[in-house]
Image (spheres, rainbow, N blue to C red):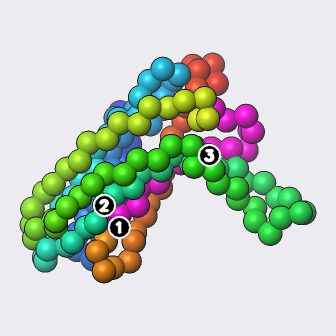
Amino acid sequence: MHFKQFLSSIGIGSLKVNTVVERPHLEEGETLNGTVYFTGGNSDQEIEFIELNVIKQIEDYREDSDFDVIENIVAKQSLEFIGSVKSKAAVMHQFEIVPDERWILENPKGKLILRTIVHVNNGVDVHDEDEITYGTTDSL
């Protein structure tokens, strides 16, 4: 199965934020490219910045831990956003994240997550996450 696009979205009040990744299934040597789209709602929305995190997540029960999910950030990128998204306006920010050997999953229970966090001025930070894959053609 081949996915042409990868879409995650976050709603902040009436503001819509969509993260679109060109290729969610990456082979070694490829780059994670995408765009964060903002569509204004009924009022202006002040945004401080957008944070993109690639997280290696492992779900596994361990008797010596209170947590069943372990997360390690393997890539982090901040997109500056000065000002606001105006009512009914559309704004976009492109991003590119270069994978490295830390993205390779050794644990069969592990997965890679792309987490988009929108930092809202004087508001509640909102996040969304979706799974991506990285590795050789044989490992996908």
Where does residue 19 sit, x and y in percent of width and height? Answer: 33, 50
Q: What is the three-letter code of the residue carrying label 3? A: Lys
Magenta part, dominant SS? strand
Horizontal relation, residue 110 to residue 140: left or right: right
- Circles 1 and 3: CB atoms closer than 8 Å: no
Q: Is residue 128 above or below residue 43?
A: above
Amino acid on which disc 2 is placed: Phe
Q: Which residues are magenta?
A: 104-119
In front here: 3 or 55?
A: 55
Q: Position of residue 1 (x, y in %)?
A: 48, 30
Q: Residue furthest right?
A: 63
* Residue at the disc numbered 3: 56
Q: Amino acid at mark 1?
A: His
Q: Which mark is residue 108?
A: none
**Residue linked to disc 1:** 119
- Report if residue 39 is visible in the image: yes
Between the residue at mark 3 and the residue at mark 2, the CA separation in whole angstroms equals: 23 Å
Q: Is residue 120 magenta?
A: no
Asked whether disc 1 touches disc 2, contact meaning CB atoms under 8 Å apart, the reply is yes
